Image: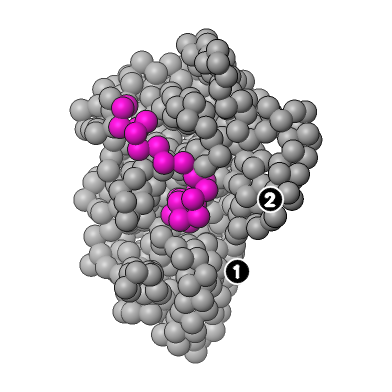
Amino acid sequence: MEHDMKAHRTASAPERRHDDSRVSSHSRDGEGELMHRSSFARAFGLVMACALVGSVAACSSGSGGGSDGKVSITVQGMPPKSDPASRKAFLDRVAAFEKANPKITIKPTDATWDAQTFTAKLAGGSAETVITAPLTEPQGLIARRQVKDLTADLKAWPQYNEYNSKLLAPTKDAATGKVYGLTAPIGTYSMGLVYNRALFAKAGLDPDKPPTTWEEVRQAAKAIHDKTGQVGYAETTTNNTGGWHLTSYTYSRGGTMEKRQGDKYVPAFTGKATTDALQLLHDMRFVDNSMGSNQLQSQMDVQRRFAAGQIGMYTDGPNAVGPIVQQYGGRLKDFGAGALPQDGGNATQLGGSVVMVTARATAAQTSAAVKWILAEYLKPAYDPKEAAKRDKMTSADPKILIGVPRVASFSEQAQQKVNAARKPYVNVPLGNFQPYVDGNAELKLLTEPPVAAQKVYAALDPVVQAVLTKKNADPAALLDKAAQQVSSDLERGQ
């Protein structure tokens, strides 16, 4: 694992993610289908969309490149006006990039991924040239041919072969091996166990040794509840977070959410791994009484209560420290992070965002876009000077947390050099994250369900809710019913 650049000040939508504010989608600074039209309507819509922002050249594809070799591209990733320091730093990097590449003009936006509107933007041609999307989306974008094949441009990048192949997998076309984007290093995380060190101590538990198995989680949760009166373990169950967490629990038990059957994916969450995960939640809730009475909670609800010292443990990435400390006033010294507890799976779930180029980009724009992606997102992860430069710029603001762990993007040797360069600016207690770093080194990193992941999560939210609110709930029956719904969603998504 590597130490991330900074932790974002607020959670952005959709709320369940922890990523970099420059990698918008489900993002926070941590270390957020198709429309068919006639040819005329599509052309008219594109012109109108461009007219709204001033000119055709200002639309998603910018200027495709003229005889003078100049090209312009629009890019997502600019922090919002509510974060003026990060926004200024971003614009300074844009200016520096344009100075180093005088024939490329960057037109940034602070637009973020929105599952309800972005497909229409892509179909209508108003999406930016460089887009960021959650890790649930790239396979669908690739299948619909809405993003550009970047294989040739990326293979010309000297660091390509050093880039973590596990992070490359989500943006690859499994059938052809072609690469359509990169998982952004800043904000990339794997699911773990977030816990309150102060409550651990009060309950007689060792804050430096969080649970590593789900049975240990159950025991610790009961101890916290019985000895402190607080919730031992909390679960998120709304806005797709119930299904999202259940996926991690399934992976930790050796299961999967989807499997390939012939040439298509079908539901695979009706087996023992997912059923056992739900049964454990049910028993912690109704047998141990260690989960409290409020079971309809969003991620923000849980983070807020965690910050107030009312929750001992819950599942999240270590970059949850950002909103817990910065937005909800939690104490940094009380925040602890461990690896995702296991029960035979030896695996955890990878999260974050991908950076891709829209299919409408010209060859010149594609080349320019890849240059921007490598400079903005990848260079700080392998270049010690760039990493230190960015940390130095942000270290003046004590609200920005530097040093929170994230998934390593490059070789161990490269990472050690980057970590050494960043060490003077680290302002978080690294020891609080050491159980996460050590534990994750031994786990497989599994990506989110490859087809219609958000719909899978949405179908499973009610299942998790039922298990935690109904004493006589039948996990197996609930999963069978959800699988019927998801089967249709997967069929439509392929």
Instruction: Give the quarter of the image for residue 9.
Output: top right
Residue drawn at (34%, 69%) of the image: 263
Residue 137, percent from left and from top: 49, 53
Q: How many marks?
A: 2
Residues shaded magenta: 133-157
Residue 24, percent from left and from top: 56, 40
Indicate the amino acid at tag 1: Leu
Residue denoted by label 2: 39
Q: Is residue 146 magenta?
A: yes
**Along the horizontal axis of the image, is 77 left or right of 372?**
right
The mark found on residue 145 in the picture is none
Q: Is residue 479 above or below residue 19?
A: below
The one of 48 and 232 positioned closer to us in this rendering: 48
Residue 159, percent from left and from top: 28, 28
Q: In whole angstroms, how far apart are the C-alphas of marks 2 and 1?
A: 46 Å
Residue 210, percent from left and from top: 32, 54
Q: Nearer the viewer, mark 2 or mark 1?
A: 2
Asked whether residue 143 appears in the rendered view, the answer is yes
Q: Is residue 305 magenta?
A: no
Task: Assess disc 2: are there few (<14), some (14-19) or many (≥20) residues with their C-alpha within 10 Å of its C-alpha.
Answer: few
Indicate the amino acid at tag 2: Ser
Dot 2 lies on which element? helix
Q: Are marks 2 and 1 in contact (CB under 8 Å)?
A: no
Task: Assess disc 1: are there few (<14), some (14-19) or many (≥20) residues with their C-alpha within 10 Å of its C-alpha.
Answer: some
Q: Earlier in the sequence, mark 2 or mark 1?
A: 2
Residue denoted by label 1: 296
The one of 332 and 348 positioned closer to us in this rendering: 348
Instruction: Give the quarter of the image for residue 313.
Output: bottom left
